[in-house]
Image (cartoon, grey):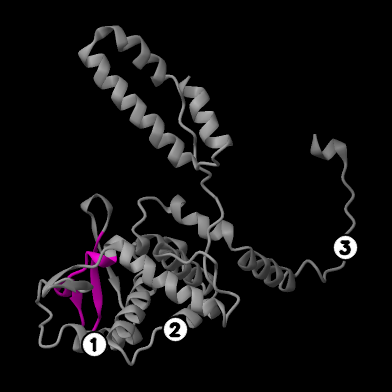
Amino acid sequence: MVNSDLDWLSAEKNAAPATRNNKLAAIRAFISYAAACRPEYISIASGLAAIGIQKNDRFAKVDYMSEEAVKALLAEPDTRMGIGVRDQFLMIFLYDTRARIQEVLDVKICDVKVDKTPTVTLHGKGKKTRIVPLMKDTVKHLQNYMKVFHPGKTWMSSEWLFYVERKGIRNAMCDDTARLRIRKYAASAREKCLDVPLNVHPHLWRHTRAMHLYQHGMDLALISQWLGHKQLETTLIYAHTDTEAKRKAITEAMASDPFLEAEPVNYTVSDEEIL
């Protein structure tokens, strides 16, 4: 019955492997609890353990935006207004840091360093932290944002970098707010630039920045460190997806291949010599 339900979920609802696996894990957890209370359910728990999880395609296609689409999106917020300054900087920060949305929203002012080598400390999955550099243009936008949203605050402040204020109380911005704002700008930017995807979400900025760095020649090992991946294999999806990079590499290799212009050489091979 469980197998049938999981198959229906994949075939009829087009659920991703992660969704199917999460449902299986929930059922297993419940039956495991039931078996601890009632021994007669142990056999059912054993049967569920035999159901295999569905593996994800390691090299599934990665969605990302073109550089033209990024420029169009960043040009949408009206920076004459405070909310426009905030929204533009939020997208710039997402793009430059290659961070997950929750990592960005968890950043406090004291996590940012703007000395000779500007950096931000990100608090990622599994309570792991990593330090990523900030580009000069990003720092300029950051300083402008600080003047508007954190006037008089020092870099040692423990306030949230991105916040919403209600009834005079400041709380960290939630990811739903960030998604709605980005979706709003994407809709208007798409009218001016057809490269802007239909579904623009915060995590798309992470994939986009990683892909652009790869296309401009950055080593995958370094990209993997900046993205906070545990294994380099996770980062290989960008190499697998970027067919344009492959085409250029083949073209350059063919153009410089010394054997292409060389005269063919006739070889006489003797079976006796080989033996």
Mark closest to the chain's N terminus, 3 or 1: 1
Amino acid type at circle 2 is: Glu
Which label sits in the foreground, 2 or 3? 2
The residue that label 1 is drawn on is 143
Give yes or no for residue 117 being in the magenta stretch: yes
The residue that label 3 is drawn on is 264
The residue that label 2 is drawn on is 76
* Residue 157 relative to residue 205: left or right: left
Which label sits in the foreground, 1 or 2? 2
The residue depicted at 27 percent of the width and 53 percent of the height is 125
Give the residue furthest to the front. Answer: 167
Determine which quarter of the picture holds residue 210: bottom left
* Residue 125 relative to residue 92: left or right: left
Q: Whole-percent x and y of residue 237?
A: 51, 55
The residue stretch that appears in magenta: 104-123
Mark closest to the chain's N terminus, 2 or 3: 2
Amino acid type at circle 1 is: Gln
Amino acid type at circle 3 is: Pro
Q: Whole-percent x and y of residue 136?
A: 32, 86
Determine contact: label 1, label 2, CB under 8 Å: no
Q: CA distance from mark 2 to mark 3?
A: 59 Å
